[in-house]
Image: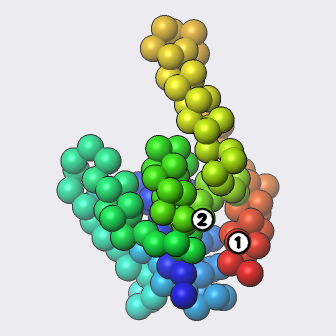
Amino acid sequence: MPRIYIDADACPVREETYRVAARHQLMVWVVANQWMNMPNDPSIRLEVVDDGFDAADKWIVERVQAGDVVVTDDIPLASLCLEKSAQVITNRGEVRDTKSIGEALAMRELMQYLRDTGESRGGQKPIEKKDRKRFMQQLEKMLS
């Protein structure tokens, strides 16, 4: 049975993930750098890692296996999980795969360069209801 790992510190779709996981009776690991309020559900576990650089990412990569699902917007983490044959979905419901991850990594580098040179400011727009709906539909599709 696959497990779901949530890169949770900045994840706006935890509740949606819990609902879909419950329908499929799957275990969810919520990995964060700090304690957070959690549902009282034995199938949802919180793992608080230290504040070290990418500590949550390292924890997930050490445990993720083929067929597991990782919820993250972190492109390098997504790439590492894909190397282990896991499935990856972003907070907005975009499925990352071995075909799309190279482009995502290149775009990340370009955007970092533009931010460093002052050409680009700001980040993603806030998540909307349609994004949450797309996330749930895509996660459901991944698990079916």
Does residue 35 appear anywhere in the picture? no
Image coordinates for residue 45, horizontal then vertical, percent = 38, 79
Taking the spot 46% from the left edge, 52% from the top edge, the residue there is 80
Image coordinates for residue 15, horizontal then vertical, percent = 57, 71
Q: Front-most of 79 and 111?
A: 79
Image coordinates for residue 118, horizontal then vertical, percent = 51, 9
Taking the spot 65% from the left edge, 54% from the top edge, the residue there is 97
* The disc label shown at residue 87, or none: 2
* The disc label shown at residue 142, or none: 1
Give the CA distance from mark 1 to mark 2.
8 Å
Amino acid type of the residue that numbered disc 1 sits on in the rendered structure: Met
- Colour scheme shown: rainbow
**Sequence-first tag of 1 and 2:** 2
Q: Is residue 75 left or right of residue 19?
A: left
Q: Quadrant of residue 31?
A: bottom left
Q: Quadrant of residue 87?
A: bottom right
Quarter the C terminus occupies: bottom right
Identify the secondary structure beneath mark 1: helix
**Marks 1,2: beta carbons within 8 A:** yes
Q: Is residue 123 left or right of residue 64?
A: right
